[in-house]
Image (cartoon, helix red, strand yellow):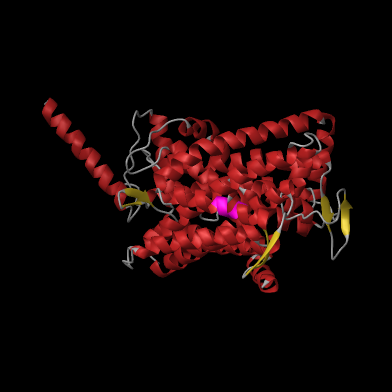
Amino acid sequence: MQDLVNTINGIIWSPALIYLCLGAGLFFTILTRGVQVRHLAEMWRLLLSGKSSEKGLSSFQSLSVSLSGRVGTGNIAGVATAIGFGGPGAVFWMWVVAFFGAATAYIESTNAQIYKEEDDGFYRGGPAYYIEKAMGQKWYAWIFAIATIIACGLMLPMVQSNGIGEAITMVFGQGDTIETALGTLSMVKVYTATGIILLLGFIIFGGVKRIANFTQVVVPFMAFAYILVSLVIIGLSIDRLPEVFMMIINDAFSPMAGVGAAIGWGVKRGVYSNEAGQGTGPHAAAAAEVEHPAQQGLVQAFSVYIDTLFVCSATAFMILITGAYNVHGAGEIFLIQNVAAEVAANSPAYTQLAVESVFSGVGKPFVAIALFFFAFTTILAYYFIAENNVYYIRRTLKIPALNLALKIMLISATFYGTVKAADLAWGMGDIGVGMMAWLNIIGIIIIFFMSKPAIKALKDYEAQKKAGVKKFTFDPKTLGIENADFWEERYAKDNSVEDNVTSKED
């Protein structure tokens, strides 16, 4: 099974996908004239403004849901894996992916807002919706929807729950074992998995609002606490910070771990962590209640910065400044060995060792707790994303049991990922991320050449902002954007209300 997963990964994560991710980010950065830099202040303003409604989330709630998907195991174990196999230089390429990826995140999230729908009393949307409406290719939209349900409902939850299981065993050990149909399992992991799925079931059976309410409290709190701890660790060895920074820059272009390895692992883990271009963020973006689609695109672009430039960088600097890492070469060779050979690179172990080296007796439990909340909220986000695609399919196939089947599949995958080996879980997760990235990035590039909806929305928003309007409006027909039914109806309704008010005043 592991060999099969590795073979599929080698095909999906060929250099072509790496170049596609970087190239798309650069392409959209140029076309938006560096939207991720020009509108930083506006991103912050929008983040703190806006209100939720019965049908949609506030900008902050939407950001929290998307961040819960972005900030997860990839920020703790994923960064360690990138360093362990790609060297310190992989961190630089994670930064590059985040910077350019913010422009990609703007494009895909704005598209999601433009082509969203109201379904079952709630806003829904995402790549499947905008691929069908903007490209006019329903078959392609169905492929994305099915791939996303498999990736987010089955493959990716295993990675997140596996990270929790590995972190817990670093604290409590493997404990007793039990023979099961799944093989020999650690009882510590079995207890952990049971606790996770009970809490998971309680929340996902409570609906989207319960997910949003949970994530908007947990995600900001844990991210702040995690970054605070990293600042303390960095501050205690602040004299080494310039050296570590230069090591990242120099290794990014050196043959130490191989330029290809640094780029490959940096891009792979960067895309896995910040999810820009992957097609997950647009689902939360579509659920937001906003006056103009470009507003949510800007908020989602900022979420990429929070994920990679803040949380991932916090992990990287902790690991590198404490020296709690190895760099694997070919076979059993280590290019750098600072910790025991048996310490797994594709786990939270490096991060736990880094924190433990400063906060003795506290580091491992703290990282385990942080990883639990990061990974658990990410699993919630995966359910939210998969559910949106189930609703998309149910527009054609009226099968109510699909939602229940998704819940059972995701809970089962979460349990399995917690108790099984890390290599298989990460391999399955990489397949899921790769499939979605290929389909989504190709989709948004084709949509750009067909109608440029996100670019038109950005220019329209900037023009209204420059004119100093008090309330933003969005008229897709005037901009030459077709099939944006939700916004066409809203614009017509708003104009009708204004006409009635005017006539009464007259």
Q: Position of residue 51 (x, y in %)?
A: 38, 34
In percent of the image, x 78 and y 39: which residue is there? 356
Q: Is residue 357 magenta?
A: no
Q: Is residue 195 magenta?
A: yes
Looking at the image, residue 125 sits to the left or right of residue 91; the answer is: left
The number of numbered discs placed on residues in the rendered structure image is 0
Looking at the image, residue 263 sits to the left or right of residue 407; the answer is: right
Q: Position of residue 467 (x, y in %)?
A: 38, 30
Q: Position of residue 292 (x, y in %)?
A: 38, 40
Give the vertical position of 211 relative to 264 (above or below).
Answer: above
In percent of the image, x 68 and y 51: which residue is there? 78
Q: Depth check: give the residue in front, 399 or 114.
A: 399
Identity of the residue furthest to the top in this view: 505
**The N terminus lies in quadrant:** bottom right
Q: Depth check: give the residue in front, 234 or 195.
A: 195
Magenta residues: mostly which secondary structure?
A: helix
Q: Depth check: give the residue in front, 292 or 354.
A: 354
Does residue 375 appear in the picture of this structure? yes
Does residue 32 appear in the picture of this structure? no
Quarter assignment of residue 15: bottom right
**The C terminus lies in quadrant:** top left
Q: Depth check: give the residue in front, 388 or 299.
A: 388
Looking at the image, residue 223 sits to the left or right of residue 169; the answer is: left
Residues in magenta, as a range: 192-196
